[in-house]
Amino acid sequence: MSARAFLRDNALSLAFGGLFLGALGAQSLAGWHVEREELREHGEASISWSDYVTSSSFGRAVLENWQSEYLQFFLFILLTVWLIQVGSPESKSLDKHGLETDEEQKVGPHAPPDAPRWAVVDDWRRTLFSHSLLLVMAAFFLLSWLGQSLTGWTVYNEEQAMHDQPQVSWLSFVTSADFWEQTLQNWQSEFLAVGTFGILAVFLRQRGSPESKPVGAPHDETGVSG
C-alpha cells in the first residue's frame, strides 16, 4: 500500500490521533506552568517539564478525563443494544433491539467468506468476539479510573504533607466526597453531551456526515445515516 493510500484509508484515526497528541502536549505545558507557580507560592523548588509529565499531578489531570470518556462509550454501546430513540441515526431501528439473530449478525453459517475467523467458529471465541468492543471499553474505563484514583490519592497526600496534615489511605480517598465530586463532574458532562446529541440528531442534519441522517430523511426515520 502506498503512503498516499494509507493516509486516505486511515485519515479519520490519524486526524484524531494528531489532535490528541497536540492537545495532550499543550495540556502538559499549561499544567507544568501552573504546577511551577503553585510550587513557587509554597516556597518549593521548581520542577522540569519531564518531571511534571511523569508526576501524579499530570497523571491525575489526564486520567480523570479518560475514565469519563471510556465510561461514556461503554454505556452508549451497552444501552444502544436494547434501547431505542425514534428518529436518531445513533439508534437501531425499532424491530432490531436486543442481540439480534445470527443471520442478522452474520455469524456461524451466515458469515460471509471474508468474515473475521472468530465470527465463524462455534465456541467461546465467538462469544468473546461478539462482546469484544464492550469488554475492551469496560477494561479501559476501569484501568483509567484506577489510575485516576491512585494518582489523585498521591497528589492529595502530597498536598496534605505540604500543610502538615495526616496522610489518608487509598480507600479513604476513593470514598471521600472530594474524589466523587471531581469524578461525577466529568460523568455528568459526558452523559449530557451524549444525550443532547442523540436528541438533536433526530431533528438536525449535517450533510455528508455518517452521524447524521440524510438531509431529506423524515424526523422519525430511525437507524439510518447519510
Image: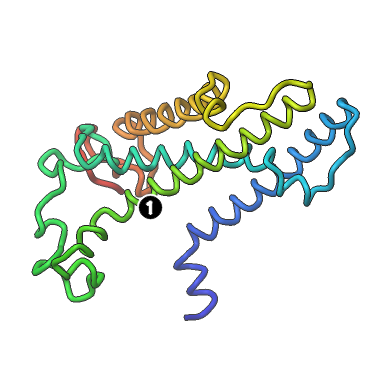
What residue is drawn where x is 71% and y is 44%? 55
Say above or below: 89 vs 8.
above
Residue 6 in percent (x, y) is at 49, 72
Outermost residue toward the bottom in this view: 1
Residue closest to the far top? 177
In this rendering, would 32 be left or right of 147? right
Query: Badge 1 local density, few (<14 within 10 Å), some, or many (20+)?
Result: few
User: Where does residue 10 sit, x and y in percent of width and height?
Assistant: 47, 65
Which residue is located at x 24 percent, y 72 percent?
117
- The answer to whether residue 201 is left or right of residue 118 is right
**Residue 67 in the image: x percent, y percent?**
49, 40
Percent across and percent down for residue 100 are: 12, 49
Q: Secondary structure at mark 1?
A: helix
Q: Is residue 49 above or below residue 57?
A: below
* Residue at the (36%, 42%) spot, across then down: 74
Q: Which residue is depicted at the point 84% across and 32% down?
A: 39
Q: State how many labels appear.
A: 1
161 relative position to 59: left or right? right
Residue under label 1: 136
Residue type marked 1: Val
| 140 or 197, nearer to the observer | 140
Viewed as shown, does residue 204 lie left or right of 103? right
Question: Which is nearer the eye, 154 or 205?
Answer: 154
